[in-house]
Image: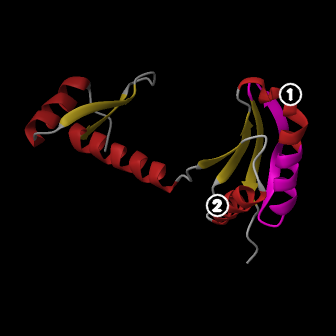
Amino acid sequence: MGVYPTREALAMAEEQGLDLVEISPTAKPPVVKVMDYKKFLFEQKKREKMLKAKASKVIVKEIRFGPNTDDHDFEFKKKNAIKFLKDGAKLKAFVFFKGRSIIFKEKGEILLLKLAQELEEYGKVEQMPKLEGKRMIMMFAPSVKKK
């Protein structure tokens, strides 16, 4: 396409039943293009949607323990944690302290560290146990699969 004065460009766009779209308004003379603007917007949205679909989504699964969780419950929750990590999701394990059970902070930390030790082949620790209010939280990321 050549460079046309604005009136001629508008006349060409109307003649073809299309829109005159300004590409670069700061250029001298301004750069314009004759196109179907609705179709252009549709294709742009379609491209953005495709890129968004290809982007990986981070899923965070949670597992809750009490400070006095017994062995059977621990093993059951550990199996779920392994499944979550194998599926590629991040894992947020936390011990929730109700009422005065906050005095058992050490038990909660020991529980989370034991979980970390048992999950080390499936995922790596992203955040060590940290007390936030009435919760002691520990984060795990799935280990990278080797091909």
Q: Residue at the location (81% across, 27% down)?
A: 102
Q: Which mark is residue 103?
A: 1
Q: From the image, which quarter does the N terminus lie in?
A: top left
Residue 146: name its quadrant: bottom right
Give the label, 1 or 2, closer to the camera: 1
The crowd level at tag 2 (other Cα within 10 Å; few <14, some 14-19, many 20+) is some
Secondary element type, mark 2:
helix
Q: What is the spatial separation of the Cα atoms under label 1 and label 2, in whole angstroms?
A: 28 Å
Q: Quadrant of the C terminus?
A: bottom right
Vertical comparison of 88 with 57: above or below = below
Q: Which residues are magenta?
A: 110-134
Q: Is residue 37 left or right of residue 137?
A: left
- Type of amino acid at the residue the image marks with label 1: Ile
Q: Does residue 124 show up magenta in the picture?
A: yes
- Mark earlier in primary sequence (1, 2): 2
Quarter of the view holding residue 136:
top right
Q: Which residue is mark 2?
A: 80
